Amino acid sequence: MKIRIDKAACVGNARCWAVSEELFPLDDDGYIDIEEFEVPAGKEDLARRGARACPERVIQVIED
Amino acid sequence: MTEAATASEPAPIPGHIPESVVYDFDMFRDPAYLADPHKRVIDLLENAPPVFWTPRNGGHWMLVSHAANFEAARDCEDFSSEVLPYKEMEALLDQLADETGRVPRAYPINLDPPLHGIYRKPLQGVFSPRTINTMQEQIRAMACDLLDAVAGKGGCEFMSAVAEPLPVKVFLRMLGMPEDKYPEYRALVRAHLDAQALPGAEGALQRLQKVAQAMRDTIEERRDERRDDIISMLWGVEIDGRATTQEDLENYGVLLFIAGLDTVMQGIGLGVRHLAENPALQQRLRDDPSLISKATEELLRRYSFTVPPRRVARDMEFQGVQMKAGERAMLFLPGADLDPREFENPTEVNLEREGAHIAFNAGPHRCLGSHLARVELNILYEELLTRLPQFRLDPDKPPSFNCGHVVGVEQLHLVWGD
Ligand code: HEM
Ligand code: SF4
């Protein structure tokens, strides 16, 4: 499973980060600091929840 | 209150607006709305068109559905945050300055991209989750003081005892203003609140000038001697590559004043009113305080309470209606977050609910202070449920509300005990 984030559309409210600081790191200004990543085994649920938490809907889950 | 005293004169319906999208709703004075705001919001969702035009208060659009709000909030080109186009507004304010002195600007809330981003960026780090988290213990101490002062009294009027003072104290502390400014700021907040509940902008500029005036000395002091506070931080940031000036600092101070005080206060008021009416929820949160942050989120959704205004920037079709350049449109976020097309059983406070509300709006203007607001609300609920016994509404003094661009609680009389 993969996560892809439309970084330019992030408005920096860290709802993803509130779900998982590890999967969704922020830059110093509080914007999302990652664009695409392979979800580690066992973290799929967390990744999905992080994506659903984004008010901007810029986090896309790509299921295998 | 009589109907006649509360209704504003209706404006004539413009020719391009069909009868089918006209609905009579006065967002400042509708009696049912004032009696119990979110009950009327649900009624609007059931009975008014998802995007409607009301002839009240000069005539304007109301965007009620989640879909309409979400789209418009992210479309700053069509839905401008500038009351007048930037250059016209600046010219007007400069002209006013000759008569009344400089008028502070609440940048970036009233700017469109790309200027908006230029003024927003310096604030981003100041309000990031990391910075705000370092404030937690100070905020907790302030909340505890206010709650302990009423805990032994058997009840209180919660707005004046806790909900209003807390954000003002947090604001002064964060900005690094002296404590003795507290009474002056409480009075300014009060004047701001009273004005919020009225249409039109009478006295608005003078009030902003007073807010700026009250922080001028501290701003000057921090320029020469930095401390660990927001005013000092703002002296250290750059706006588009240039150093900040006294004027910039006053602008930012005014922005934070109008965005961060009555909002937190109303969030607290609406949330605590729900808790007072729902002893079972109080008990559940007391039994398992780890649920409080979920309750904070769900109460923000259930009682979303801000109504940001926009100016339609060009003639266009929007979600099936014709809008014309210069018309005003309200992002009715209380409707968006109670929209059954978006949230299943929207009136239910469901701590297991997933998905994102837009109480802080969406798009480029999305609330910069949301982390701070969440921390304040969370801490307040935590300490409230620890320090006060079970509480409920005073049956002899029902709550009263105010409406406008911020919807909230005017008076909230609570009594302890079940
Ligand atoms: C529960 C409390 C709060 C709510 C519901 C809230 C809601 C909002 C909303 C809906 C907007 C968007 C306005 C628009 O689109 O025109 C906004 C913007 C803003 N808020 Fe908040 N707010 C809250 C607390 C705060 C606090 C505590 C602060 C900071 C001290 C703050 C600072 C700001 C700023 C600076 C903006 C302008 C952002 C921009 O235009 O880019 N807010 N807020
Ligand atoms: S939740 Fe969405 S908008 Fe907020 S920081 Fe994460 S990606 Fe950005």
Image (cartoon, rainbow, N blue to C red):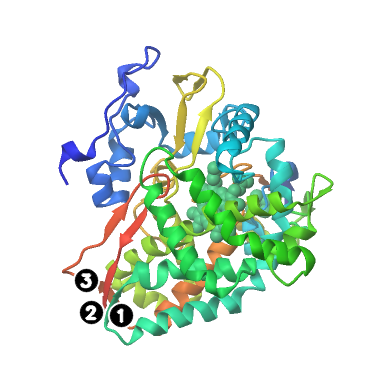
Q: Is residue B89 left or right of residue B61?
A: right
Name the residue: 47% across, 71% down: B292
Amino acid type, mark 1: Gln
Name the residue: 41% across, 75% down: B285
The percent position of residue B6, horizontal first and vertical second, equals 22, 40
Of labels 1 and 2, earlier in sequence is 1
Which mark identifies residue B132?
Answer: none
The answer to which image quadrant residue B72 occupies is top right
Whether label 3 lies within 8 Å of ligand 1 gets the answer: no
Q: Which residue position is annotated with label 1? A: B390
Which mark identifies residue B394?
Answer: 3
Can see residue B176? Answer: yes
In the image, are marks 3 and 2 on the same chain?
A: yes
* Label 1: few (<14), some (14–19) or many (≥20) C-alpha neighbours in 10 Å: some
Amino acid type, mark 2: Asp
The residue nearer to you, when weighing B12 against B211, is B211
Whether label 1 lies within 8 Å of ligand 1 gets the answer: no
The percent position of residue B254, horizontal first and vertical second, equals 58, 53
Q: Which residue position is annotated with label 2? A: B418
